[in-house]
Amino acid sequence: MVIKKIGVLTAGGDAPGMNAAIRSVVRYALHKKLEVMGVFRGWWGLINEELKPFDHRSVSGIINLGGTILKTARCPEFKTEEGQQRAYHTVKKNALDGLVVIGGDGSFRGAHQFYKKYNVPCVGIPASIDNDINGIDETIGADTAINTALVAIDNIRDTATSMERIFVVEVMGRNSGYIALQVALAGGCEDVIIPERELNLESMCHGIVEGNIRGKISWIVVAAEGAAKAEDIAKKITEMTSLETRTVVLGHIQRGGRPTAFSRALALSLGQAAVDCLLRGEQTKAVGIKDSKIIAIDLETAIQKKDLRVEHFYNLVKVLI
Ligand code: ADP
Ligand code: F6P
């Protein structure tokens, strides 16, 4: 099949660097003499035919912006047969020969279903702060989110040391401890709670009390939201140690902001790789970075549960206190 016209959309949770990926897809596709349509609000835009032609100027001045100019949404309707049928109608009506889907594992699951049902070639670009796409090393946006959270941790450390306090800081990560682990390590935090490892509160509290005796004056526990709520952990620590605690929930602060150089460079490389994939006639792939190389893997592989291999970093956090 000759590819002449493609659509690009962002779906699921936004991630810093999505705009750089859109810019790359649009400009590289135009360079390859393709027509490009920007689809708004993810799968919702395909269902409701909210799309328009994009040119060079459509993606001007966005490389340094967080969020996504295409908007994004969680769209339960795309999980239904009727929703996908309407999306297919839009694809046909607008003569789209393929789609570039920028998003996380849910968006990729949608793309894979859509290809299986309607044979519309789909290439995924992994963008999610959770870094939860299987088969690749890192998603667009994860690096930015970690650095944003790290600024907060450093600030918290100032007050924690000054007032000799224990803090429990909750970071994002629905089913993934990636942000928590990276931030805990880079922030010199004393403990970390992630969904990939069982929580042992007794040993955590024992560590706090021991640290206290050794003269440790501040203590920061980082918790991935998918593993524990900061408020619950703080309460338990106070109950078990009689020490005062404070909590911080970083929340959506981690999703916004200027993408780091790494998030942008990755996004720009993957945008080009995704268009090349479609031009090669690939039907259902995800592009990504692995061992410093840009690769393309089956969407089917990309949507499997990722094994984060947390062992090394998890143990290191515990050893370096
Ligand atoms: P993310 O892509 O960030 O993981 P979601 O999990 O919310 O975000 O997925 C984004 C969207 O992809 C969903 O709102 C839905 O429209 C679509 N989607 C997710 N899973 C499926 C599925 N199994 N079948 C069809 N569409 C899906
Ligand atoms: O998937 C990215 C993510 O930021 C998760 O870390 C978080 O649990 C979730 O999205 C929050 O989703 P929402 O913005 O819909 O509340």
Image (tube, rainbow, N blue to C red):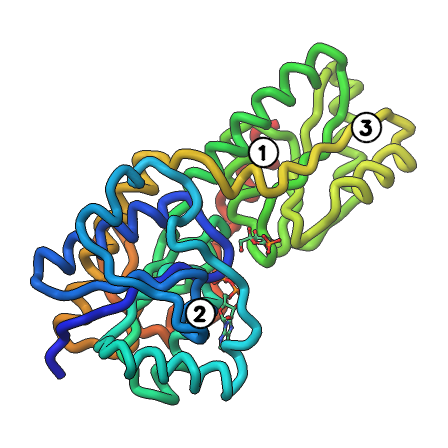
Q: Which tag is nearer the camera, tag 3 or tag 1?
A: 3
CB at disc 2 and ligand 1 closer than 8 Å: yes
Image mark for residue 245: 3
In percent of width and height, residue 208 lies at 77, 29
Please indicate, yes or no, whether residue 31 appears anywhere in the rendered image.
yes
Q: Are marks 1 and 2 in contact (CB under 8 Å)?
A: no
Q: Nearer the viewer, residue 25 or 129?
A: 25
Determine the secondary structure under disc 1: helix
Residue type highlighted by circle 3: Thr
Q: Where, quadrant-wise, is the N terminus in this rendering?
A: bottom left
The residue indicated by pointer 2 is 43
Q: Are marks 3 and 2 in contact (CB under 8 Å)?
A: no
Question: On the rendered structure, is 106 left or right of 224?
Answer: left
Determine the secondary structure under disc 3: strand
Q: Nearer the viewer, residue 22 or 219?
A: 22
Question: On the rendered structure, is 173 left or right of 208?
Answer: left
**Which residue extends farthest top?**
162
Residue type highlighted by circle 2: Trp
Label whose residue precedes the other's in the sequence (3 or 2):
2
Alpha-carbon span between mark 3 and mark 1: 23 Å
Image mark for residue 216: none
Residue type highlighted by circle 1: Val
Alpha-carbon span between mark 1 and mark 2: 45 Å
Question: On the rendered structure, is 302 left or right of 216?
Answer: left
Image mark for residue 319: 1
Q: Are marks 3 and 1 in contact (CB under 8 Å)?
A: no
Q: Residue at x 30, y 86 (%)?
A: 119
Look at the picture and state if 153 lies above or below 65. above
Q: Where, quadrant-wise, is the C terminus in this rendering?
A: top right
